[in-house]
Image: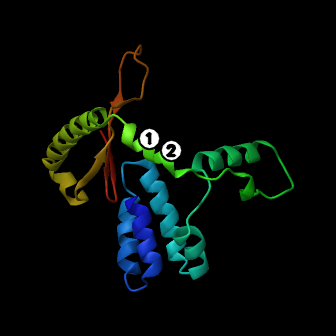
Amino acid sequence: GAVSALAKFGAQNEEMLPSILVLLKRCVMDDDNEVRDRATFYLNVLEQKQKALNAGYILNGLTVSIPGLERALHQYTLEPSEKPFDLKSVPLATAPIVEQRAENGPVAVVKQPEKVAATRQEIFREQLGAIPEFRGLGPLFKSSPEPVALTELETEYVVRCTKHTFVNHMVFQ
């Protein structure tokens, strides 16, 4: 998607590369794991400033199936071998399957949790913004969706923790 397009633009336009790198660094803080992974990958390739790497990994892209690659790498790590990993053993990617999944996905179900998370996020932003000591930390980036239990529920004291992530700091509540 957008991260791949940014990376391709950065690989083709050296003048815009510094701005593209800044945008990719911001994408590394995204909520979506796949966006973060892609941004990290493209960021590392682009920072090498080698046209061969850009052509091989960004402009031409990986033609292998990502789930297939993951399975093959997992299998390779489970079975010790003297031979290096062979990328040719991984099945090729098929674009139509990805498009079908995107079209058939329930849009309403996906949007409802985002609304709840945004409301919860706003509450945390207001509460933490009211504390003078936290104002110097900058804007709140993300809070954990649910408090994590630090003790078992059967114990005398029940302790839960909510993690608040700022750009350069973390606050545990």
Amino acid type for the residue under numbered disc 1: Arg
Which secondary structure lies at badge 2? helix
Quadrant in the rendering for residue 75: top right
Q: Is residue 122 left or right of residue 161?
A: left
Q: In the current view of this chain or complex, which residue is farthest to the right?
A: 82
Q: Is residue 64 above or below residue 59?
A: above
- The answer to whether the residues at label 1 and label 2 have Cβ atoms under 8 Å apart is yes
Question: Which residue is pictured at 53% across the width and 81% down the height?
Answer: 49
Q: Which mark is residue 97?
A: 2
User: Which residue is labeled 1 in the image?
Assistant: 101
Residue 163, percent across and down? 34, 41
Question: Which residue is pictured at 48% across the width and 46% down the height?
Answer: 98
As measured in the structure, the alpha-carbon distance from the residue carrying label 1 to the one carrying label 2 is 6 Å
Q: Which mark is residue 140?
A: none
Question: Which residue is pictured at 49% across the width and 55% down the height?
Answer: 37
Q: Quadrant of the N terminus?
A: bottom left
